[in-house]
């Protein structure tokens, strides 16, 4: 899996597993991360350990599944690409 996040040297990135109540910005509102994973077809048994990427403490992406609009890389801007082979 690969996820790209817009980031520069001052951006504080974090990685964590999915926690109860985690939500991410999607389409002008927020959606539970568990719903994002379900909609992507991720089996329920894998969801609690799925990687969530944070920017400055706010969920920016569900690795390999979805990136929030505000964290999507813009052409010409610095970005970080995260690759992980832990989930398939």
Image: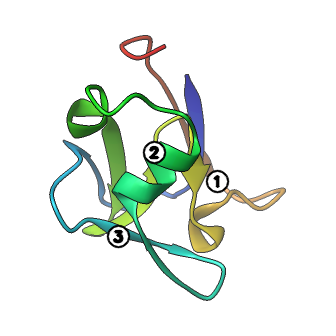
The residue closer to the viewer here, 82 or 47, is 47
Q: Tell me, yes or no, whether the two marked residues, 2 and 3, touch with CB atoms within 8 Å.
A: no
Q: Is residue 80 above or below residue 44?
A: below
Disc on the earlier residue, 1 or 2: 2
**Residue 68 picture quarter:** bottom right
Task: Name the element at disc 1.
Answer: loop
Query: Where does the image place residue 15, in percent across and percent down from the top left?
Result: 26, 43
Q: Which mark is residue 36?
A: none
Q: Dot 2, crowdedness within 10 Å: few (<14), some or many (≥20)? A: many
Q: Choose the circle earlier in sequence order: 3 or 1.
A: 3
The residue closer to the viewer here, 88 or 6, is: 88
CA gap, disc 3 to disc 1? 25 Å
The residue lying toward the viewer, choosing from 7 and 61, is 61
Q: Residue at x 25, y 68 (%)?
A: 57
Q: Is residue 17 left or right of residue 88?
A: left
Residue drawn 62% across the image and 88% down it: 28
- In this rendering, which labeled residue sits more in front, label 2 or label 3? 2
Can see residue 5?
Answer: no
Q: Please tell me which residue is depicted at 72% across the width and 59% down the height of the picture.
A: 77
Q: Distance from label 2 to label 3 (Cα)? A: 11 Å
Q: Using the image, tell me which numbered label, if any, was put on residue 23.
A: 3
- As drawn, the residue found furthest toward the bottom would be 28
- Quadrant containing the N terminus is top right
Could you tell me residue 20's position as x and y percent?
A: 15, 60
Q: Nearer the viewer, mark 1 or mark 2?
A: 2
Please state the horizontal and vertical placement of residue 84, each as a whole percent of the image. 43, 19
Give the residue at mark 1: 78
């Amino acid at each position: 899996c690969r996820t790209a996040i817009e980031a520069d040297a001052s951006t504080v990135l974090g990685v964590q597993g999915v926690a109860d109540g985690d939500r991410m910005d999607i389409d002008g509102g927020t959606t539970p991360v568990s719903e994002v994973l379900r909609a992507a077809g991720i089996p329920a048994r894998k969801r609690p350990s799925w990687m969530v990427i944070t920017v400055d403490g706010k969920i920016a992406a569900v690795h390999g599944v979805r990136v929030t609009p505000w964290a999507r890389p813009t052409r010409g801007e610095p970005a970080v690409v995260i690759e992980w082979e832990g989930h398939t």
